[in-house]
Amino acid sequence: DTVKDDHSSMEDMKGKKILLVEDNEFNQMVAVDTLHHIFDGIVVDVAENGRTAIEKVSANDYSMILMDIQLPEVSGLEITKRLKADEELPGIPVVAVTAFAMKGDEEKIRQGGCEGYIAKPISIAGFMRVVEHHLPAPTCNAVLASVPPRCEDRRTRQKTRLQGTRSLLRVRP
């Protein structure tokens, strides 16, 4: 709980959906439990192979994909290349989670299309930082835009108050 309590940005993760592509059941359990423990409200789907991963990505709206590189049948890098080449799919960030931790492996994996890299065995703090970095978080404008139209006056007042506060904080000569 100490990791969770130290990070207020975790609230931004509610409703985000991650696809974990991992063939090892133990690694699946650890990753899913860690994500649920650290990021309250996050949804995690699991695909145990490349074929299932491609099917799930085509049928769902994911915010991020955590991709094992060593998978049966088709490598995680090959799956990543196929996903990145598909013009129908939005630019979903793919983060490699891999035992490939030799010099040059991270560069090779990034050149293969992965936006992020996590070496196994994972460090919880490092894992959390990489996931937070690659999950799109709502912006202030997105939050203001989510206010229902009947609250338009309140939204305008909040924006005006925010602008007024900014002008009070400016250093004057």
Image (cartoon, rainbow, N blue to C red):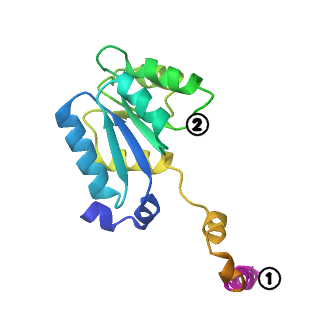
Tell me the residue at 47%/62% (across/down). Answer: 12
Q: Quadrant of residue 68?
A: top left
Mark 1 near mark 2, Cβ–Cβ under 8 Å? no
**Amino acid type of the residue that numbered disc 2 sits on in the rendered structure:** Gly
- Residue shown at 53% from the left, 56% from the top: 137
> In terms of secondary structure, where does tag 1 sit?
loop
Magenta segment: does it hold 170? yes
Looking at marks 1 and 2 on the same chain, the residue that comes earlier in the sequence is marked by 2
Amino acid type of the residue that numbered disc 1 sits on in the rendered structure: Arg
Residue 66 position in % (x across, y down): 39, 36
Q: Residue furthest right?
A: 173
166, 12: nearer the viewer? 12
Front residue (pair 129, 19):
19
Can the viewer see residue 112 in this picture? no
Find numbered disc 2 in the image and state the secondary structure of the residue it sits on. Answer: loop
Q: Quadrant of residue 90?
A: top right
What residue is shown at x 23% (from left), y 49% (from top)? 33
Left or right: residue 137 versus residue 42 is right
**Residue assigned mark 1:** 172
Tell me the residue at 28%/39% (across/down). 122
